[in-house]
Amino acid sequence: MTRSSNTATTLDKLDDGRMDDGLVSWLVTISIGGVALIMRLWNLSYPSKLLFDETYYPKDAWTMLHQGYEGTWGDAKTINPQIAAGTSNGWTPDAEFVVHPPLGKELISIGEHLFGMTSFGWRFSSALFGTLMIVLTIRLARRLSRSTMVGAIAGILLTLDGLQFVMSRVGLLDIFQATFLVAGVAAVAADRDWFRHHLADEIRQRGQLSLAGQFGPRLWWRPWRLVAGIMLGAACAVKWNSMFVLATMGIVSVAWDVSARRLAGAGRAAWWSILKDGVPAFLYLVLVGAVTYLSSWGRWLSSYSTMMFGKGWGGPHADPGLAKVVGTPLAALWDYHVQMYNFHTGDYMMHQTHAYSAHPAGWLIMQRPIGIDAVNDIKPGQEGCDAVGDTCLRVISGMGTPVLWWMAAIALAAGIVWWIAGRDWRF
């Protein structure tokens, strides 16, 4: 009798997460997402000029839209006002050297294709992805907490967060990277539940009460793990530092497999999961992620023969031996990556200074905001300035809601302690 009770408890734990409020949860999710989308699209074209690093990515996206790779623009002080005034032809077909993969700029180009080289056009995709990030956060928080209400609260807080709001309304790469990363993490969490539920189903179908010390079934098809590989690979195709999240999620995913088999009664045999589940996990996450990343360079590779490498990268410096094995375009792409890496790690970047530079240690507490735009000397009566005998200053800053971020930093520390002390997988 005791054994049956314990086994039922084990299977119940494996079945945890099968929630029955699916319709209500999606109504809540869509409602919050709809409000978030309206907030992000409202007056999106203001200011109508290029802000901060919009001087790079929307212009790259525009030339990619027309020739498949990033072209070269003239001096920003001359070109940027022309773009704001509606002139978008100040570029040449010479291939520009860029230091980030193409996917984020490809996504920006979708809005430009729909609405032209306008401030609304180059920010449109950011607004959509910012909204999608909120939707994904709601679903992830709901899954982790097993509560639609908690998911809704998470979505509302993110909808109103200052940093997320600003990044959803500028044509930069960060919102695309963040959204793909949240999607990847959400897929890994979904895979955890999927694996446990199918493990429980397999045990029942075999007429067993537990794995009884055996390793258990090999579940080769892992749809959510495949989604995770695609999403995390896409994040890497926006910015390289997403690779750290991919590696972390790979370790976490396999650790959850070990935990699930131990819970199912595999005992010491569960540790074989590091190898038996780890190898497929590597294929799903790393290999699929790599293929996703490489596919993001498809238009670059297809445009290779027409590129004008006037600045000394690509074909002229591709390793001849490598070119014989993989072909000149892929060898040129490898050389291009080497130069991108050298740019990010070389002396030029190491010695750069910026008035708004912030050490990563201070990011969680919002020690220093991101300066997006500033306009000085706004006259009284203009642009909402109601100063008397003085002028106004308008500033757009990328700064998270302080109370939310400070409390989140405390919650993160508490979560780590809770995880170590209580072994709660959600933390």
Image (spheres, rainbow, N blue to C red):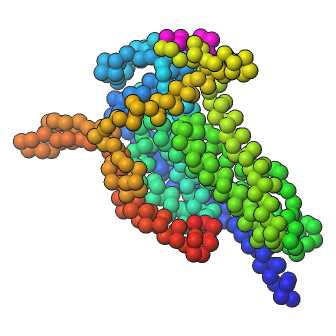
Q: In this view, does 375 lie to the left or right of 270?
A: left
User: Which residue is depicted at the point 34% across and 21% down?
Assistant: 76
* Nearest to the observer: residue 224 or residue 22: 224
User: Which residue is depicted at the point 42% across and 40% down?
Assistant: 169
Q: Is residue 337 above or below residue 421?
A: above
Whole-percent x and y of residue 353?
A: 32, 37
User: Which residue is depicted at the point 69% across and 43% down?
Assistant: 286
Residue 201: quadrant of the picture: bottom right
In what quadrant of the picture does the C terminus appear? bottom right
* Nearest to the observer: residue 148 or residue 275: 275
Residue 49: quadrant of the picture: top left
The outermost residue toward the left is 389
Whole-percent x and y of residue 13?
A: 74, 73
Whole-percent x and y of residue 419?
A: 58, 70
The outermost residue toward the right is 207
> The magenta stretch spans which residues?
304-310
User: Which residue is depicted at the point 44% across and 24% down?
Assistant: 59
Residue 43: quadrant of the picture: top left
Magenta includes 340?
Answer: no
Magenta includes 305?
Answer: yes
In what quadrant of the picture does the N terminus appear? bottom right
Q: Is residue 15 above or below residue 136?
A: below
Q: In this view, does 173 lie to the left or right of 268?
A: left
* Camera sees residue 268: yes
* Nearest to the observer: residue 28 or residue 80: 80
Q: In this view, does 10 lie above or below 385?
A: below
Q: In this view, does 129 lie to the left or right of 166?
A: right
Q: How many labels does the image show?
A: 0
Q: Is residue 146 left or right of residue 87?
A: right
Whole-percent x and y of residue 380?
A: 13, 39
* Camera sees residue 195: no
